Amino acid sequence: MRGSTRRPDDVRVPGSILAYDIETIAPQVEDGSFPPWPTHQPVAIGFADARLSRGSWTFAIDAMVLIPGECDEATMISEADRRMAAAEVVTSYNGRQFDALVLRLAAQRQRLWGLKALADHAAANRFGGEHADLADLYASHGRKVGLASICDEVGIPVKTDVAGSDVGALWEAGEHERIRRYVMEDSVATLCLYLAWGAARSADEAAITRPMAALARHIEATPGLQHLHAFVDCSLMRWCRPRAMKADIGAALKRVTARLRREEDERAFATS
């Protein structure tokens, strides 16, 4: 039987992951269909950043909303470029066909020509690993479905209060905070789905249980993230947390065993 042909990079857990999502407004189309992507203006972007260092996960979750006099389009796009530059993997849901294209065109509209990370992201190879478009990955590059269709099956909450079709009306009504919470929720859902994808791809349960449990702790400990508590209570999280504790204990035992072995070897060397 032949061995696996997968390269190590195919299944390695990245050290830094940026999940993002944008919300847009666009002129209505006469027939009621979805407006062509070049007509969309980004009005919000959510970021869910996860980093793994020495076996521990840390998170940064926030969002920016286009508000006259507070945050303009150029600032929002430049921040997206900065964050993409700092991430090993950028993940989205259908970002290759929408989010990245809208951001790239918006950057050109704003005459922002020096955004290398955004340019690389929008031009990333479809089959490469730098842009993990989960709509492509979950469909094996075939017919795509909506984010909610996948999240519902995996047990990840999504669109608990607002849907993308509501954003235009919310924007007109000045409901910027509801848009901010919504885009932040979608970015966290995308991050959770990426963790699920990565764990299945690497056939490693701990690759989802440990970061998900750390995410729950981060949300619980951060006052500004109360609106994300649905992720703490979701079925996937309830499954992950007890298993993460077992994995953490196993990892700690392995570290202690390795340390004791090193100390024993050092003593043996010193007395030889």
Image (cartoon, rainbow, N blue to C red):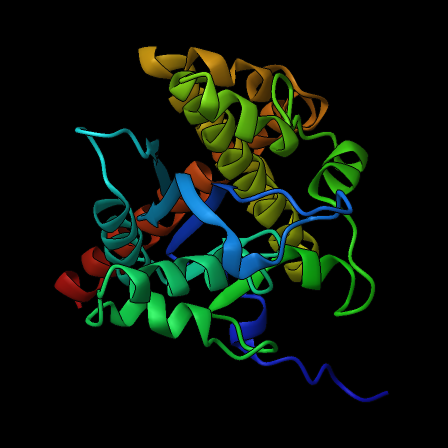
- Give left or right: position of 259 versus 32: left
- Give left or right: position of 171 versus 256: right
Quarter residue 72 falls in: top left
Question: Height in image: 169 above or below 114?
Answer: above
Q: Quadrant of the C terminus?
A: bottom left
Q: Residue furthest front?
A: 30
Percent of width and height locating residue 3: 75, 85
- Which is more toward the observer, 107 or 188? 107
- Give left or right: position of 3 versus 266: right
Question: Height in image: 134 above or below 252?
Answer: below
- For image coordinates 61% across by 55% down, the residue present is 198
Mark yes or no: residue 46 visible: no
Question: Height in image: 61 above or below 8?
Answer: above
- Give left or right: position of 183 versus 15: right
- For image coordinates 46% across by 16% down, the residue present is 173
Percent of width and height locating residue 75: 21, 46
Q: Residue furthest left?
A: 270
- Which is more toward the observer, 181 or 66? 66
Percent of width and height locating residue 228: 50, 19
Percent of width and height locating residue 111: 22, 66
Mark yes or no: residue 103 visible: yes
Number of callouts in the render?
Answer: 0
- Which is more toward the observer, 61 or 171? 171
- For image coordinates 37% across by 74% down, the residue present is 120
Q: Residue furthest right?
A: 1
Q: Quadrant of the N terminus?
A: bottom right
